[in-house]
Structures are given as structure tokens and as C-alpha cells.
């Protein structure tokens, strides 16, 4: 039964990180409102079709290897929400990214003596807040150095049905903070087409936390743009038997609407 629980719990725990951080450089021309004081504000949603691979461990069980495609993860997704935003003044910027996902699933157990089935539910929160300064900026593009902190929180609950353990539930989780730093920027190839991307790396609670992406955007008109690219994110965290050492990567796609 322990091996069954490890496989199910590890897979669902790994799923929880799939919708991790995406920064506003992916859509530098999202909703923008310029105030009389010179501030510029932008917001945008994304879809990140990321698969996941790595090692996860929980409930004191040995870490197991996980290799799940985006379709595998999507089958277990109950709810996901992600919001990002940026405020900019001259060469300075403040940005934030908040993500929450809930994934669940169930499986039968061998022989059904201790329990006939096990249900696993994982909730994951990842939030980034940071500030940047443009080292280079002109009418064609911008390159800025950024720094901030990313907060991770992963909580998993296991519930047993049937058998000796009927009605028993247990939870395991971890919360940690990583300092992040790197570069992000965008460059206009034509008035309609632009390139954008970022590279961040950090550590703190995790041994390493990194995030890189590149994308191309197309502005249809003053109201709507589309963006497509590829992103990879990795985090290596372990503490007191809780292991979360994973890499997520896959295409990103978004439709930008300006008001």
C-alpha cells in the first residue's frame, strides 16, 4: 500500500506546480493605462501547457520519479487561476505574479484490506513580487535587471475510504521563500511583431529556483495581441522528508486584450 500511496501522492503533488510563474514581459503590450503622473499599468492571463519531470517525496516515504505530460496533468486539474500585473514609471517597474491550483485524483489499493481506495488532493500557491530597472530602453525595446522574492506553498491531503483506515486522512506540506534575480526584456521587430523573454535564478528555501522563457508576439490592432513561446522552470526543495525537485517545461500561449 505504501508504494501505491507514494505513486499517487507523488504524481498529484508534482501536478500542483504546473501553473507556476509567468511574467508580464510575455505580453509587454497587455492592458495599458497611462496616468497623468506618468505611470503605466498592465495585466494579462496565460495558458502554459507544461509537462513535469523530477522527484517528489512526501509523508516520510522515499522520493519517487515523476514524468507527466501536460495532458496527464490536465486530467487531474480541479481548478487553476493565475494573475500577473505590472506598474511602470520611467525606467522603474514593480511586478507581481500570483498562481493557485488544485489537483485531485483517486486510485484503488491492493486487496482493499487497509482501504479500498485512496484520494489525494494537492493545493499549490506560487507568488512572485519584484522590481526592475531598465538598463537599456528606446523606441524598439527594453532590457531590465530585476530582483524579487517567490513564495511557494504546497499542501497535500490523503484520504482513505473502506477497509481498516476508512475515514482516516493525513496531510503534508511545505512553504518556503526564494530570492530571485535576473534579466527580462522585449524587442520590436516591426510595429506588429515583437520578441520577449526573461531569465531568472535564485535560492533560499530551495537549493535552486530558476525560470527562463522566450516568446514572439503579434499585435493585431490597438486592442488585441497574441503571444506564443516556450518556458522552462525548475525548483529543488527538500526539508524533513518533503522533496520537491522538479522541472516544468512547455509552450505558452496567450491572447492579449487591451481596454
Image: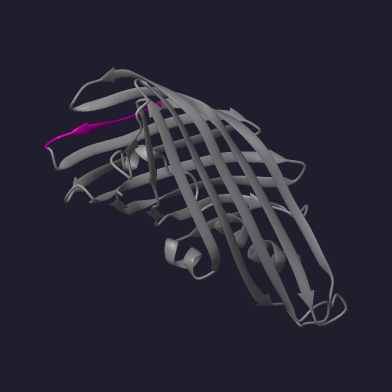
Numbered disc total: 0
Would you place residue 252 above or below residue 157 in this image?
above
Q: Residue furthest front?
A: 36
Q: Height in image: 173 above or below 142?
A: below
> Residue placed at 84% from the left, 71% from the top?
168
Q: Does the magenta stretch mainly form a helix, a strand or a loop?
A: strand
What residue span does the magenta drawing correspond to?
A: 183-190
At x 64%, y 34%, the residue is 177
Q: Is residue 212 left or right of residue 246?
A: left
Residue 166 location (% of width, % of height): 84, 78
Indicate yes or no whether the magenta region holds residue 195. Answer: no
Residue 132 visible in this rendered orientation of the protein: yes
Residue visible at 61% across and 53% down in the picture: 124
114 or 230, nearer to the observer: 230
Residue 46 or 5: which is nearer the viewer? 46
Q: How is the image coloured?
A: one colour
Direction from residue 162 to residue 195 in the image, left or right? left
Is 185 a magenta residue?
yes
Rendered residue at 67%/38% (across/down) = 176
Residue 107's spot in the image, x, y percent? 66, 76
Q: Is 110 left, or right, of 222 in this rendering?
A: right
Amino acid at each position: 500500500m505504501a508504494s501505491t500511496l507514494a505513486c499517487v501522492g507523488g504524481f498529484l503533488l508534482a501536478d500542483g506546480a504546473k501553473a507556476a510563474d509567468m511574467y508580464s514581459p510575455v505580453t509587454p503590450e497587455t492592458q495599458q493605462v497611462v496616468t497623468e503622473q506618468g505611470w503605466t499599468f498592465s495585466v494579462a492571463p496565460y495558458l502554459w501547457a507544461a509537462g513535469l519531470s523530477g522527484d517528489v517525496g512526501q509523508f516520510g516515504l522515499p522520493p519517487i520519479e515523476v514524468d507527466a505530460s501536460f495532458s496527464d496533468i490536465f486530467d487531474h486539474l480541479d481548478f487553476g487561476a493565475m494573475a500577473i500585473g505590472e506598474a511602470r514609471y520611467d525606467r522603474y517597474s514593480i511586478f507581481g505574479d500570483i498562481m493557485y491550483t488544485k489537483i485531485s485524483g483517486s486510485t484503488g489499493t491492493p486487496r482493499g484490506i487497509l482501504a479500498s481506495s485512496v484520494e489525494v488532493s494537492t493545493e499549490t500557491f506560487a507568488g512572485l513580487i519584484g522590481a526592475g530597472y531598465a538598463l537599456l530602453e528606446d523606441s524598439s525595446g527594453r532590457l531590465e535587471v530585476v530582483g524579487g522574492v517567490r513564495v511557494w506553498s504546497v499542501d497535500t491531503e490523503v484520504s482513505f475510504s473502506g477497509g481498516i483506515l476508512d475515514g482516516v486522512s493525513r496531510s503534508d506540506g511545505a512553504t518556503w521563500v526564494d530570492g530571485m534575480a535576473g534579466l527580462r526584456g522585449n524587442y520590436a521587430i516591426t510595429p506588429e511583431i515583437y520578441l520577449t523573454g526573461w531569465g531568472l535564478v535564485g535560492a533560499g528555501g530551495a537549493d535552486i529556483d530558476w525560470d527562463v522563457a522566450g516568446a514572439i508576439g503579434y499585435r493585431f490592432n490597438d486592442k488585441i495581441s497574441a503571444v506564443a513561446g516556450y518556458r522552462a522552470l525548475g525548483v529543488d526543495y527538500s526539508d524533513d522528508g518533503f522533496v520537491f525537485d522538479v522541472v516544468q517545461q512547455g509552450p505558452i500561449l496567450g491572447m492579449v486584450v487591451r481596454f
